[in-house]
Image (tube, rainbow, N blue to C red):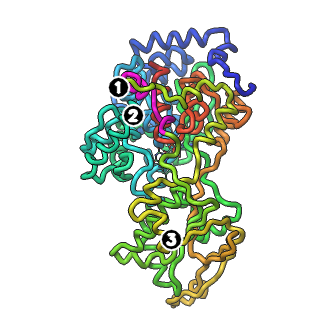
């Protein structure tokens, strides 16, 4: 479909004889009296019907322990049993998947609540725990505070994070005019000065406290019990359900028939520069800070000991190069400097910290303007308080029906590779660390790399000659310098491709024929983020509808609100 033309969702119903519309009406009528699972039974085949009934019974009997049910289904599936019927299946248990689950379960007064009780949601995620990727990645960067402010978190109520840590919310947060805001900001700085839970600038939460609050949400809604560890391998939507094939962690295949699927898959893969080889990674010379394959929490926690023991065997001081001049690289560089300066004998860890960036340091407070982060509830509050309601930026975006133009707006409004003023010019900030030589800044690209062997200071007496030598990396930079380092940490962010690989490209775009923008290949979803009547998109996949903040925590809140509204 040409850019600019929005296909009405009703088109999806056009191919059949109207039975699907009748089915939906049936579902709606059922949902007020029965659980969605029960309604589903009516639509399923005779064999499916039997299976669905037993699942519904399980839900009532064993306190909705989906994980137990999944284990049971692994065996049943091996024996050629029926697929698992589930009203809501969320693919991805990151920030987005978890918040959407909480919203479906916790929103008061929703007509459909009966269809979204705990037993009716399953979160399929390939990690052992929910939010694992978020926690590993953020801990690997060494960041202390989030970039976003206290209103962006995984609970429903805007002030939940503040209240969790005993901080009084400001009146009328997020609404009102400019003048009012400035006044309030000053007030909030004074009222928060006694608390380290949030920064004085924009009330940004401390990472460990933010995570503690996330855990409290997971616990409140018992979300770990709804987590089925596995990788979704295929998705086939049809009129009556979405068939989802999941490869579980023990290699077995489970088949779900879901009433609704939410795609909360996260970003494209981390980006590796062309000059990095497999061997560099295998030798431990290069590591991407956001790649969970190479950065586990365990590895990060043991980094200290690892570096300390290695340093004792080196005849030279340990040097680290960070590639990337954005906030991830800045956090990591500052963390290494902090550790070097700490009183523990951590100071032996790293002697030289290099930061290599193609561009100069660029300051920006948030990933995108705050106007892009305002959800509809906040817009309504703003309107009531005499503010302007839906921000101009959002209205302009929604009124622009060209997907190409929308992509351009997103690119303009979401500038990668920036650092916050606090990280740059705050106490012990990046510009001071560069100024006093604690961080060596190189505005350059890496032109060449070479492995260099060196003799270790303390020879190993195990007779193995290989153990007497280590390998370092020599980097030739476009600014004319050459540096030798022990490890290279990539802070080069994520790729820009459509996330989800074959799952999205093959199953949903090529086979199911779901609509994408001709310009960028990203999904065209309706206002409620439905890419198909039974498939919802979140995060990057919903970017053309939600705008530049779609990938952030704010975007998770915008997505959850829209999805919830569609079933209300
Ligand atoms: C270091 C860092 C700091 C950030 N700081 C902030 C901040 O301060 N404020 C802010 O608003 N945003 C911030 N962000 C951005 C954003 O909030 C995060 O990227 C967020 O974690 C995205 O959440 P997600 O759920 O979309 O993706 P993810 O956290 O990646 O979760 C997606 C999950 O889906 C799983 N998955 C994917 N495909 C499948 C499949 N086929 N089968 C099963 N499971 C699958 C993945 O394994 C993963 O667990 C930060 C990001 C990073 C990396």
Residue positioned 41% across, 29% down in the render: 378
**Mark 2 Cβ and ligand 1 under 8 Å apart:** no
Return the residue nearer the eye: 485 or 201. 201
Mark 2 neighbour density, 10 Å: few (under 14) some (14–19) many (20 or more):
many
The answer to whether 167 appears left or right of 369 in the picture is left
Quarter the C terminus occupies: top left
**Residue 504 image offset from top left, x and y in percent:** 65, 36
CA separation in Å, label 3 and label 1: 59 Å
Against 445, is 2 above or below? above
Mark 3, Cα crowd under 10 Å, few <14 / some 14-19 / many 20+, is: many
Q: Position of residue 382 (x, y in %)?
A: 40, 26
Q: Which residue is mark 2?
A: 174
Give the mark nearer the N terminus: 1 vs 2: 1
**Part of the protein shown in magenta:** 370-385
SS class, disc 1: helix
Asked if marks 2 and 3 touch (Cβ < 8 Å), the reply is: no
Could you say whether the residue bearing mark 2 is in a helix, strand or loop? loop
Q: CA distance from mark 2 to mark 3?
A: 37 Å
Q: Position of residue 415 (x, y in %)?
A: 59, 47
Q: Predominant secondary structure in magenta?
A: helix
Among the two numbered marks 2 and 3 on one chain, the one whose residue lies closer to the N terminus: 2
**Which residue is depicted at the point 70% across and 65% down?**
275
- Where does label 3 land, which residue? 439
Residue 82 in sight from this viewpoint: no
Question: Does the magenta run of residues contain 384?
Answer: yes
Figure quadrant of the N terminus: top right
Q: Is residue 45 magenta?
A: no
Q: Secondary structure at mark 3?
A: loop
Q: Is residue 256 left or right of residue 65?
A: right
Dot label at residue 60: 1
């Amino acid at each position: 479909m040409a850019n600019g033309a929005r296909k009405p969702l009703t088109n999806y119903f056009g191919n059949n004889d109207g039975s699907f519309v009748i089915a939906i009406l049936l579902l709606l009528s059922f949902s007020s009296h029965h659980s969605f699972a029960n309604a589903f039974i009516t639509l399923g085949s005779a064999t499916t019907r039997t299976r669905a009934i037993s699942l519904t019974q399980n839900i009532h009997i064993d306190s909705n322990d989906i994980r137990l049910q999944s284990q049971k289904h692994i065996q049943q599936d091996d024996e050629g049993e029926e697929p698992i019927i589930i009203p809501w299946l969320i693919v991805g248990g990151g920030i987005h998947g978890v918040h959407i689950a909480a919203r479906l379960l916790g929103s008061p007064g929703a007509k459909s609540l009966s269809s979204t009780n705990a037993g009716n949601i399953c979160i399929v995620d390939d990690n052992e725990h929910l939010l694992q990727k978020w926690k590993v990645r953020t801990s690997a960067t060494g960041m202390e505070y989030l970039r976003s402010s206290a209103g962006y978190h995984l609970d429903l109520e805007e002030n939940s994070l503040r209240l969790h840590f005993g901080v009084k919310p400001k009146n009328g947060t997020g609404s009102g005019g400019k003048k009012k805001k400035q006044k309030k900001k000053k007030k909030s700085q004074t009222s928060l000065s006694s608390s380290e839970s949030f920064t004085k600038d924009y009330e940004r939460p401390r990472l460990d406290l933010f995570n503690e609050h996330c855990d409290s949400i997971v616990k409140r809604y018992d979300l770990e019990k709804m987590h089925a560890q596995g990788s979704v391998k295929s998705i086939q939507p049809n009129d009556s359900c979405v068939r989802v094939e999941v490869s579980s962690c023990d290699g077995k295949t489970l088949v779900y028939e879901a009433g609704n699927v939410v795609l909360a898959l996260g970003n494209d893969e981390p980006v590796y520069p062309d000059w990095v080889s497999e061997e560099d990674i295998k030798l431990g010379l290069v590591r991407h800070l956001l790649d969970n394959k190479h950065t586990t929490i365990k590895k990060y926690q043991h980094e200290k000991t690892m570096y300390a023991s290695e340093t004792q065997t080196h005849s030279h001081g340990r040097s680290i190069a960070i590639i990337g001049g954005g906030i991830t690289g800045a956090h990591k560089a500052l963390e290494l400097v902090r550790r070097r300066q700490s009183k523990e004998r951590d100071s032996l860890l790293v002697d030289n910290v290099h930061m290599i960036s193609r561009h100069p340091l660029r300051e920006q407070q948030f990933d995108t303007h705050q106007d892009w982060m305002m959800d509809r509830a906040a817009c309504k509050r703003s309107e009531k308080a005499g503010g302007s309601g839906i921000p101009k930026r959002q209205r302009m975006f929604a009124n622009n029906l060209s997907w190409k133009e929308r992509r351009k707006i997103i690119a303009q409004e979401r500038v990668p590779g920036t650092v916050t003023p606090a990280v740059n010019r705050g106490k012990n900030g990046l510009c001071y660390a560069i100024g006093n030589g604690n961080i060596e800044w190189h505005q350059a690209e890496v032109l060449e790399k070479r492995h260099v062997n060196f003799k270790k200071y303390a020879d190993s007496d195990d007779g193995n000659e290989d153990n007497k030598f280590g390998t370092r990396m020599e980097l030739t930079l476009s600014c004319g310098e050459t540096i030798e380092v022990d490890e290279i940490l990539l802070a080069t962010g994520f790729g820009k491709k459509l996330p989800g690989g074959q799952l999205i490209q093959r199953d949903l775009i090529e086979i199911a024929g779901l609509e994408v923008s001709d310009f960028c290949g990203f999904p065209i979803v309706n206002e409620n983020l439905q890419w198909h009547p039974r498939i919802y998109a979140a995060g990057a996949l919903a970017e053309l509808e939600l705008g530049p903040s779609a990938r952030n925590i704010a975007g998770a809140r915008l997505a959850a609100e829209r999805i919830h509204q569609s079933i209300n």
